[in-house]
Image (cartoon, rainbow, N blue to C red):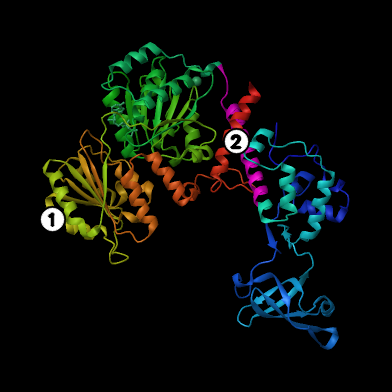
């Protein structure tokens, strides 16, 4: 098995290297460079390009390496204590440059009028002077390598040690030949050599690409190995559910499952039936029908008399899930809800029932992880938007399980390449198809001056008895004059539609006020809700068919998409209008993308292309390895290739 950063036959302790005495050995140990493989992978932190450049591209005070024709005889002035200054005029890239070398009088013999010279120095653009540092006699230039050595030793010394390692080391581990050929990669030895002893930028780049691939390939193999180990095989994980009962129940559903739903149910049920613990992520956009899939899994577990817990991050979501599950599973599953708001009496009853096995499915918030919550036979744990829980919270729930089968749900579409690293050790089921008959939200982009027409259309919707969300970016006074803040917009709508129809909710309100405002909107008493993005999470008002987002350019694609997900929740046609006067190309592009697709996965992929994956990482990246060359946030294309290769490779090994 290949290991990361292990490439030679038997990596030798540094003290065994030729030319490394006790002193150097101590320094290397201080840098935690203790054996030859570690030294090979202690890569330069930078290269100083000694190759010749065009002086016209240089900025004031740049360090430059140039080539030019000597125009004048050099003159030398000597000072006290042997100091000297040599001055010569050289024509460099069409510029007549005065070049000065301090304390190198012997260079006089090397400077012959009419001949070409190469040298490095500091460029004074204002005076057209170069303070010369070194003459270069090998005109191919080259690189000076800089190592991160914390001042403990010189890069040159370290280079010498690296050269010694190359002489001794027997490279025996390498990327499989076929992937090297397919992706035109160097051998590891070549790549490391080019990074330590670079000759030109092309080789450096190709060498970096090779090492990136190598790191990500091994990383992927390790992930697969970890997954294999984590998914313990044990008879106790077999949930021999009643497949006929499950099928019979599915037949009674008022609709047919989509292909993606069926596939997801199959994948989950296969996990249950196997003698391994489930560790699966169920991804699907809002409204794609994850609830029913999760519910069917819980139904399967119930057929052998065991229990499911569904943990969600907020009270609002708990209520919503509870309602949706009741709609589909009432009479089939005993479902209860437990949150921080559950009364003491109610809680006591639920706790007793849970411990007795009288509840099949419990839906709740963090309240579920408390010590007094005890299950008779918890065999399926579902968490919604799991990234909002800490590892410890999830573990505390997992610890209550009889059989640890875990299903994570998320409505945040994550591009495939990113789920590889963020959820690398999980199996993934994706629901991409929307249920049949769903009408995609029609999305338009309008200028602010066209607001009136938009309001015209909105009032038609209200007349039909539908509701509308109006989203504004801020609650303070506008930062800039043309930014419409939520208060201003509230005024606009009150004037236009009358106070009795318009509700205002924003993040600065007290929770009670907010809840009351929301309730008036949800009940239909107030059909128009003006708000900030507080509505992003967990609101379900099926009668809402219209959304207006002011200053839409202020929001990222994923936020716009989450917002838009609040409408289109019934069989009626819904609309989303982006009001925006974008100032940048990027903002325009976002408006165009929003109006061209409602597919969250496509959006997330476009988003990734546009701005790079930086924003997807950060929080979630913690726990991922620190590579020497590869950068998970940038090298997702290499990652994808490395991943495919690793999967293929592992399959070949095991067959
Ligand atoms: P999610 O949890 O993924 O946001 P839901 O499970 O709440 O989505 O589903 C949204 C709505 O679509 C629910 O009212 C649900 O009953 C309905 N639904 C789910 N699957 C289908 C289907 N295959 N055909 C028709 N309607 C469906
Ligand atoms: Mg199982």
Closer to the camera in the image, 196 or 219: 196
Which residue is the extreme one toward the front? 114
Pointer 2: residues within 10 angstroms few (<14), some, or many (20+)? many
Q: Which residue is mark 1?
A: 496
Q: Is residue 529 magenta?
A: no
Q: Position of residue 525 (x, y in %)?
A: 14, 43
Quarter holding the C terminus is top right
| Numbered label tally | 2
Which quadrant of the picture is home to ligand 1?
Answer: top left
Residue 545 position, x and y percent, is 21, 41
Left or right: residue 397 compared with residue 600: right
Q: Quadrant of residue 215?
A: top right
Task: Label the magenta part by its dominant secondary structure.
Answer: helix
Quick check: can you spot residue 35? no
Q: CA distance from mark 1 to mark 2?
A: 58 Å
The residue at 81%/39% (across/down) is 170
**Numbered range of the magenta stretch:** 205-234
Q: Residue at x 12, y 41 (%)?
A: 464
Tell me if label 1 and label 2 are in contact, CB under 8 Å.
Answer: no
Q: In the rendering, at what x and y percent does residue 277 appear?
A: 52, 24
- As helix, strand or loop, the secondary structure at mark 1 comes to helix
Q: Quadrant of residue 569?
A: top left
* Residue closer to the observer: 235 or 423: 423
Point out the tag, 1 or 2, that comes first from the N-terminus. Answer: 2
Can you tell which mark lies on residue 220?
2
Residue 223 inside the magenta-drawn segment: yes
Q: Position of residue 408 (x, y in %)?
A: 44, 32
Please tell me whether mark 1 or mark 2 is closer to you in this view: 2
- Left/right placement of residue 338 relative to residue 240 reads left
126 lies above or below 569: below
């Amino acid at each position: 098995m290949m290991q990361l950063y292990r490439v030679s036959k038997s990596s030798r302790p540094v003290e065994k290297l030729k030319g490394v005495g006790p002193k150097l050995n101590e320094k290397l140990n201080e840098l935690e460079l203790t054996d030859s493989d570690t030294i090979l992978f202690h890569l330069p932190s930078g290269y100083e390009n000694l190759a010749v450049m065009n002086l016209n591209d240089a900025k004031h005070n740049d360090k430059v390496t140039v080539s030019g024709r000597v125009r004048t005889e050099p003159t030398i002035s000597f000072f006290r204590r042997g100091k000297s200054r040599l001055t010569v005029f050289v024509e460099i890239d069409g510029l007549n440059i005065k070049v000065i070398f301090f304390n190198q009088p012997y260079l006089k013999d090397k400077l012959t009028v009419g001949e070409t010279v190469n040298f490095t120095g500091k460029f004074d653009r204002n005076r057209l002077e170069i303070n010369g540092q070194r003459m270069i006699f090998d005109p191919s230039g080259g690189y000076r390598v800089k190592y991160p050595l914390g001042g403990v030793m010189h890069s040159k010394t370290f280079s010498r040690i690296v050269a010694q390692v190359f002489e001794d080391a027997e490279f025996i581990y390498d990327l499989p030949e076929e992937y090297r050929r397919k992706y035109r990669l160097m051998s590891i030895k070549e790549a490391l050599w080019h990074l330590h002893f670079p000759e030109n930028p092309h080789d450096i780049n190709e060498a970096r690409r090779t090492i990136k691939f190598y790191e990500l390939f091994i990383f992927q193999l390790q992930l697969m190995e970890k997954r294999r180990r984590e998914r313990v095989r044990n008879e106790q994980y077999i949930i021999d559910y009643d497949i006929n009962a499950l099928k019979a129940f599915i037949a009674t559903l008022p609709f047919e499952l989509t292909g993606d739903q069926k596939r997801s149910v199959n994948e989950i049920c296969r996990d249950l039936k196997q003698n391994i613990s489930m560790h699966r992520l169920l991804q699907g956009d809002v409204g794609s029908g994850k609830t029913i899939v999760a519910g069917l899994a819980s139904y399967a577990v119930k057929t052998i008399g065991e229990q499911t817990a569904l943990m969600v991050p907020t009270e609002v979501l708990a209520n919503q899930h509870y309602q949706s599950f009741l709609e589909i599973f009432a009479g089939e599953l005993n479902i209860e809800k437990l949150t921080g708001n559950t009364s003491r009496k109610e809680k006591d009853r639920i706790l007793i029932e849970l411990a007795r096995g009288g509840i099949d499915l419990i839906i709740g918030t963090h309240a579920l992880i408390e010590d007094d919550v005890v299950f008779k036979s918890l065999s399926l744990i579902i968490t919604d938007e799991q990234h909002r829980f800490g590892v410890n919270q999830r573990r505390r729930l997992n610890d209550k399980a009889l059989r640890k089968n875990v299903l994570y749900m998320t409505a945040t579409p994550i591009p495939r390449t990113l789920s590889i690293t963020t959820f690398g050790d999980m199996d993934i089921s994706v629901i991409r198809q929307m249920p049949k008959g769903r009408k995609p939200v029609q999305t338009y982009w309008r200028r602010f001056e066209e607001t009136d027409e938009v309001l015209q259309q909105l009032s038609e919707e209200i007349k039909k008895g539908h509701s509308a969300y109006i989203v504004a970016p801020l609650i303070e006074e506008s930062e800039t004059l043309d930014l419409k803040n939520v208060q201003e917009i509230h005024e606009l709508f009150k004037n236009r539609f009358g106070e009795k129809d318009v509700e205002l909710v924003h993040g600065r309100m007290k929770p009670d006020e907010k809840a009351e405002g929301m309730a008036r909107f949800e009940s239909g008493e107030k059909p128009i809700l003006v708000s900030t993005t507080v509505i992003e999470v967990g609101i379900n008002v099926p009668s809402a068919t219209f959304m207006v987002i002011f200053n839409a350019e202020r929001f990222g694609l994923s936020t716009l998409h989450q917002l838009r997900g609040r409408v289109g929740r019934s069989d009626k046609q819904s609309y989303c209008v982006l009001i925006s006067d974008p100032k940048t190309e990027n903002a325009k592009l976002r408006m165009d993308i929003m109006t061209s697709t409602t597919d969250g996965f496509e959006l997330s992929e476009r988003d990734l292309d546009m701005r790079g994956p930086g924003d997807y990482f950060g929080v979630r990246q913690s726990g991922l390895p620190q590579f020497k060359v590869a950068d998970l946030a940038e090298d997702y294309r290499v990652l994808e290739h490395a991943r495919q290769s690793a999967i293929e490779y592992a399959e070949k090994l095991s067959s």
